[in-house]
Amino acid sequence: MSVRRVMGIETELGITSTQVDQRGEPLTPMVLSGQVVRAYAAGAGPTAALPTGSGWDYADETPLRDARGYEMARALAHVSQLTDTFDPTIANSVLSNGARFYVDHAHPEYSSPEVTSPREAVRYDRAGELVGLAAVRTLAEQGRAVSLYKNNVDGKGASYGTHENYLVPRTVPFDRLAAQLIPFLVARPVIAGAGRVGLGQVSERSGFQLSQRADYLEAEVGLETTLRRPIVNTRDEPHATPHVHRRLHVIVGDATMADVTTLLALGSLSAVLRLVETHPGWVPDVRLADPVTAVKQISHDPSLRTTVPLTDGRDLTGPDLLESYLEAVERAAASGHEAWEPDADTTEVLTRWRSVLDALRRDPAECAAQVEWVAKLVLLERFRERTGAGWDDPRLAAMDIQWHDLDPARGLAQKLRAAGRLERLVPVDEVASAVTDPPEDTRAWFRGECVRRFGGDVRAASWDSVVLLDERGKLRRVQVPEPTAATRERISGLLARHTTTASLLTELASEDV
């Protein structure tokens, strides 16, 4: 399995518009986000996206359960943590590719379907860009202008998340998992950062840094995702058989427009997780003296020379930390352990990780086609050389936002991608097919095919369930707790035998809703 495991990416999109209400006041981001989700569902049609009045099945959501062994009292939780509360006014749609497209707080969010490899994660993450773009174009046809940005900060103090999810065995003690991951997550922006103009949460200092998210991290370990953001999130909501799996919910990463950067973000972390699972004694002993400060120090230095102190008295750079993890992963991959059986995905990730890290050590500019923060920095430096602009020039902050615009006519990253200056890993036609077609090797296939085949008779869904109408018009839940069950190979014959949900339910175990 090595780097192959069940994983996915959730991305909240930044949103702007010049639309105003009847009083001439700007429409709120929540209203605009609702427009976006409804526009996509309407434009895609019922066989590609459930109507936004359809529901999300919250039955198995546990956002307040903590992996450290307890559950936060509901009365003490911030309202943003109550993600298991049904609100009929919130637009929500499940797509035929198995993804969820909905309004999360004040943003449209595309949550990709479960996939089993970093390269497939790149493919379905890029498909999410096309989903957002399709919504924008549908609204434009209606005379409603909206812009979407795949970034994580507005430069004025707001940060919105891109969360990664990885299925890991419940047998791995969470405390050890967190401790062994923290130094890696602190250093990962060196190979996986999207780059940002401005230092500090409200860009109170001028400059450029590697990560969009670093300045918003305030704790080492914690349950929250919108306040006191931790390096390791403890939400214990597996969306899978709970006594077998846990879901590692990673909130420190950036939304990325560069394929290789996305591949390295997920692939390297999956490899480190496998190292923690199979060879915990080989994980580098690089305990940071102050991880929360270190993540900012590393992010604030594009020269990659800044060192951060370890508890044993050593001082290491971000590339040094990543090198120690990569060497341990390479050793594990060559160990002959059954969990490290070679596959193409693992070879690709480890080869890319090694080549990028070596090039960054020589000269970061060598990675301008692969590492997003480098690509953005090179573009901005050329503008600075041409105009004499300082890092406090608002034109640079505007270019930073424009980098992430999903509209290919305006988005700077999209233009570099089209020009071949950002390496493309997934062909355009494969990304296009991922907008409507689900992954075939996870339960996302069952979820997506139910949408495509049965449309209006699918009344709700979640990551581990689909709610269907039976022959009496009553709702019944089909549970799919195992992420690698209900794949195309396993159940394509089953679905082929039925043309209605009522008929399908006669052959499936289900429960009343």
Image (cartoon, rainbow, N blue to C red):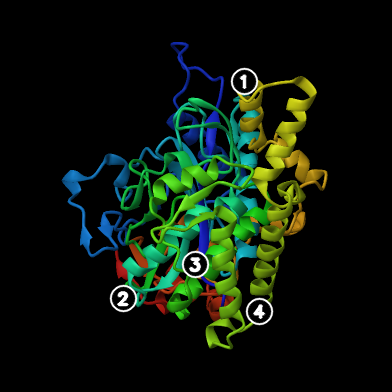
Pointer 1 or 4: first along the chain: 4
Query: Is residue 17 placed above or below 185 in the rendered structure?
Result: above
Q: Which residue in the structure is indicated by mark 2? A: 243
Q: Which is more foreground, mark 2 or mark 1?
A: 1
In the image, what residue type sits under mark 4?
Asp
Determine the image quadrant of residue 208.
top right
Disc 2 versus disc 4: nearer the observer: 4
Instruction: Tell me which label, 1 or 3, sits earlier in the chain.
Output: 1
Q: Position of residue 229 (x, y in %)?
A: 37, 45
Across and down, in percent, residue 240 comes to 39, 69
x 56%, y 24%: residue: 17
What kind of residue is marked 3? Thr
Q: Amino acid at mark 1?
A: Pro
| Left or right side of 393 for 443 | left
Q: In the image as oriented, which residue stretches furthest toward the right?
A: 419
Secondary element type, mark 3: loop
Quarter of the image where one finds residue 238: bottom left
Closer to the chain start, of discs 2 and 1, is 2
- Residue designated by label 3: 500
Compare marks 3 and 4 and give the one earlier in the sequence. 4
**Mark pair 1, 3: CA separation:** 57 Å
Q: In the displayed structure, would residue 379 be above or below residue 290?
A: above
Q: Quadrant of the C terminus?
A: bottom left
Q: Picture coordinates of residue 121 (x, y %)? A: 60, 60
| Residue of label 4 | 343
Q: CA distance from mark 2 to mark 4?
A: 28 Å
Along the line of sight, the residue nearer the viewer: 159 or 483: 159
The single residue placed furthest to the top in the displayed view is 23
Q: Which residue is mark 1?
A: 394
Real-space Cα distance between discs 2 and 1? 51 Å
